[in-house]
């Protein structure tokens, strides 16, 4: 077998996520990652300009995080989290409460972003159920993405992923994202929805819709939606799986709105990309409705690896890094650098528009492209051949690089994007 490349051996047994293997048989075997650089089995280096789906924000194999986790590994690896507790989970909860919006007070563990959304949905549904009411309708934004489990798929609006399963979805009504002009129309739509349905909750990605190609919306419009939900007993569930932990320029996107969510979903950058973990946090008011002498009013949801001590340790180290002066300075520097690049590139004839929030930068190309079409593949290949890992979504190219990316690396990312405009 040694004569075969990893790329060849992969084809025998592996089935990759979000992949039509007949059309895309080739995978790239990565053998090493350090800082912002991925290395493949042939020794090629790639700048990871999307931080491996926005997880490794402090750089790959970050020494501070890995050394903390390797110390923890000698002490306590895994234990059941029903009926047991441990210091890494407790310390993590204390660190999180310091940076979350101050209405958040309880933290529930799971192990991926989709599940954290499912837990949020279950909390919202059971909140009403425990109060003796059956509320079965959810509200969500058009074109949102919340993950691939059934609850998360139901509230997502990107149908490319969901076609075969739609008949089994939860009842979801959709509203457009606020754009600064459709404010009245959205509130009217919300009024109609709550007049005609028993609404349990509103699930939303605050300010930036990640998988929907970093589509951005208006904070004051979102704030009035949240306000309306509060006034009408609709539980608000902020999916900050993508926006959380500094990406938008604040620790959480929810800080841009005056009205805070009842429930928050977190994952992706939580552990700095080292280990899979997710959280659903909630206010004391939500928790109190589950706190009862009646056992059936509890939240009967749990995963084997809930609050894994190693993942908790990675998350704790990541939060310490996030709060450090170095990382905060880097976030400001990347934000400023994107602004300069944006101003430079926005009038290029192949560029339709640009948008930015914090370290999230997106550019729409002035060409029609399918989400997974040939032109998209051509762009991806061009980027990789030039040593930069970017993953265009339809006609959008976006950057969400680790906070530790160097000036030179960032300039290379910009240059490759600019050069790519010439091959279109
Ligand atoms: C990635 C993502 C999810 C799903 O997280 P997984 O860990 O991939 O299950 C949910 N919501 C948002 C906003 C995401 O970006």
Image: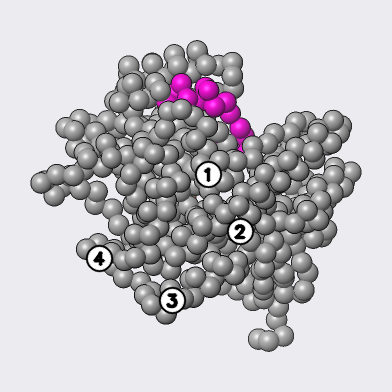
Q: CA distance from mark 1 to mark 4?
A: 30 Å
Q: Position of residue 25 (x, y in %)?
A: 68, 63
Is residue 225 covered in magenta? Answer: yes
Q: Position of residue 406 (x, y in %)?
A: 75, 56
Mark closer to the chain start, 3 or 1: 3
- Identify residue for label 1: 251
Left or right: where 261 falls relative to 339: left
Residue found at the far front of this picture: 325
Image position of 61 with respect to 151: above or below: below
Mark closer to the chain start, 2 or 1: 2
Q: Position of residue 8 (x, y in %)?
A: 68, 74
Q: CA distance from mark 4 to mark 3?
A: 18 Å
Query: Residue 375 — which label?
Result: none
- Identify residue for label 3: 73
Residue contact at pointers 2 and 4, CB within 8 angstroms? no
Residue contact at pointers 4 and 3, CB within 8 angstroms? no
Q: Residue at x 63, y 54 (%)?
A: 326
Q: Secondary structure at mark 4?
A: loop
Q: Residue at x 54, y 66 (%)?
A: 65
Left or right: where 254 falls relative to 55: left
- Viewer-proximal residue, 402 or 294? 402
- Identify residue for label 2: 58
Q: Residue at x 60, y 55 (%)?
A: 57
Image position of 162 with respect to 23: above or below: above
Q: Residue at x 70, y 66 (%)?
A: 38
Q: Specify few, some or many for label 1: CA neighbours under 10 Å numbering under 14, 14-19, or 20 or more.
A: some
Chain part drawn in magenta: 209-226
Q: Quarter of the image containing the C terminus?
A: top right
- Identify residue for label 4: 84
């Amino acid at each position: 077998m040694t004569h075969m490349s990893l790329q060849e051996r992969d084809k025998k047994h592996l089935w990759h996520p979000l992949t039509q293997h007949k059309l895309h048989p080739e995978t790239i075997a990565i053998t090493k990652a350090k800082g912002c650089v991925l290395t493949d089995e042939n020794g090629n280096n790639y700048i990871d300009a999307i931080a491996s789906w926005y997880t490794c924000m402090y750089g790959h194999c970050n020494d501070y995080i890995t050394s903390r986790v390797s110390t923890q590994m000698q002490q306590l690896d895994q234990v059941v989290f029903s009926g047991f507790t441990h210091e890494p989970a407790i310390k993590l909860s204390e660190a999180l409460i310091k940076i979350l919006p101050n209405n958040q007070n309880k933290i529930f563990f799971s192990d991926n972003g989709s599940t954290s959304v499912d837990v949020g949905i279950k909390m919202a549904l059971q909140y009403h159920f425990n109060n003796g009411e059956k509320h079965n309708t959810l509200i969500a934004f058009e074109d949102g993405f919340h993950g691939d489990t059934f609850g998360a798929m139901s509230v997502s609006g990107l149908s490319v992923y969901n076609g075969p399963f739609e008949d089994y979805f939860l009842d979801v009504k959709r509203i457009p994202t606020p754009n600064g002009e459709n404010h009245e129309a959205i509130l009217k739509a919300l009024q109609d929805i709550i007049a005609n349905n028993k609404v349990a909750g509103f699930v939303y990605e605050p300010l930036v819709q990640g998988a929907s190609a970093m589509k951005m919306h208006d904070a004051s419009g979102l704030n009035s939606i949240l306000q309306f939900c509060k006034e009408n007993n609709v539980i608000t569930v902020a999916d900050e799986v993508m926006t959380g932990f500094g990406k938008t320029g604040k620790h959480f996107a929810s800080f841009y709105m005056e009205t805070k969510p009842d429930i928050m979903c977190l994952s992706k950058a939580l552990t700095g990309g080292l280990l899979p973990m997710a959280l659903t946090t909630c206010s004391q008011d939500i928790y109190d409705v589950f706190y009862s002498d009646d056992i059936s009013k509890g939240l009967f949801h749990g995963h084997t690896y809930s609050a894994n001590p190693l993942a908790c340790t990675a998350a704790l180290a990541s939060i310490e890094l996030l709060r450090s002066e170095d990382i905060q300075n880097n976030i400001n520097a990347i934000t400023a650098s994107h602004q300069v690049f944006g101003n430079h590139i926005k009038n290029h004839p192949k560029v339709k528009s640009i948008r930015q929030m914090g370290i999230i930068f997106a550019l729409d190309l002035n060409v029609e492209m399918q989400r997974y079409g040939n032109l998209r593949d051509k762009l991806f290949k061009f980027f990789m051949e030039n040593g930069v890992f970017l993953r265009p979504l339809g006609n959008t190219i976006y950057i969400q690089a680790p906070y530790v990316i160097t000036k030179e690396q960032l300039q290379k990312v910009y240059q490759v994007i600019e050069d790519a405009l010439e091959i279109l």
